[in-house]
Amino acid sequence: MFELVFTRRFSMAHRLLAGESERCALPHGHNEYVRVSLRATNPGVLDGHTNMVLPFQRAKETWHRFIDEQVDHALQLSEHDPLLDWFGRNEPQRARRILVTPGDPTTELLACLLMAKLNAFLADDGGLLTCASIEIEETPTNTVRYTGNPFAVLPQPRPAPKCWWRRADMTIADT
Ligand SMILES: Nc1nc2c(c(=O)[nH]1)N=C([C@H](O)[C@H](O)COP(=O)(O)OP(=O)(O)OP(=O)(O)O)CN2
């Protein structure tokens, strides 16, 4: 079966409060790569004319716009992080650039949130493709890969329509 594989780079900052590492609890940044593999939902044969699963541009346009305009240079914070309140009170304009996660914004969580978001975009575009796997290279030495259904592992803190990763829009938070 064909897979269309697209890679995008983004910069981000986060901190992890619930784990054991004091180092990770201080805000810090990474330049990351996200690589997605897309499969046809109803695979067919090449037609002898266009010979495409789908034009690359159509398959990746909304996704790359989301990564470039919303994820790139966003600060990622847990919805329990007190820094969220600080930004809301002191820099409300910048608070809109915070990607808010259900619990600590680890690479595992981000991979599944982004996969769910991509699948929402693909479903909204006719459901011709679905994301089969995602990889996030957090650092040159650490990569997380997820294959399968992201909802099998994602927390569900609120009803589905109130979770930004389930909506086919450009939101990165629910507040
Ligand atoms: N399972 C996870 N463990 C860790 C995550 C994560 O998302 N999932 N994230 C971090 C921190 O973000 C940390 O900044 C990166 O990890 P670390 O291994 O400390 O990165 P290094 O660049 O220092 O890696 P080296 O290969 O040791 O140079 C921590 N853990």
Image (tube, rainbow, N blue to C red):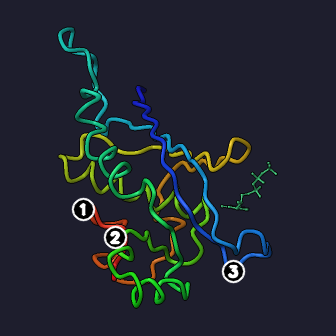
Amino acid type, callout 3:
Ala
**In the displayed structure image, the side of residue 66 where residue 55 appears, left or right:** left
Task: Please give the residue where the numbered disc 2 appears in the rendered image.
Answer: 164
Residue 14: image location, x then y, percent = 58, 67
Residue sitting farthest toward the top: 48
Residue 91: image location, x then y, percent = 39, 81
Residue plotted at (33% across, 83% down): 175
Residue plotted at (28% across, 26% down): 53
Pointer 2 or 3: first along the chain: 3
Pointer 3 or 1: first along the chain: 3
- Ligand 1 quadrant? bottom right
Residue sitting farthest toward the front: 90
Quarter of the image where one finds residue 61? top left
Q: Residues within 10 Å of mark 1 (few under 14, many from 20)?
A: some
**In the displayed structure image, the side of residue 35 where residue 19 appears, left or right:** right
Residue plotted at (28% across, 19% down): 45
Amino acid type, callout 1:
Asp
Task: Please give the residue where the numbered disc 1 appears in the rendered image.
Answer: 169
Between 155 and 33, the one nearer to me in the picture: 33
Task: Please give the residue where the numbered disc 3 appears in the rendered image.
Answer: 18
Q: CA distance from mark 1 to mark 2?
A: 8 Å
Residue 145: numbered disc: none
Q: Does the beta carbon at disc 1 come under 8 Å from ligand 1?
A: no
Q: Is residue 164 visible?
A: yes
Tell me, yes or no, whether the two marked residues, 1 and 2, touch with CB atoms within 8 Å.
Answer: yes
Between 144 and 69, the one nearer to me in the picture: 69
**In the displayed structure image, the side of residue 112 where residue 41 appears, left or right:** left
Mark 2 element type: helix
Residue 48: image location, x then y, percent = 21, 8
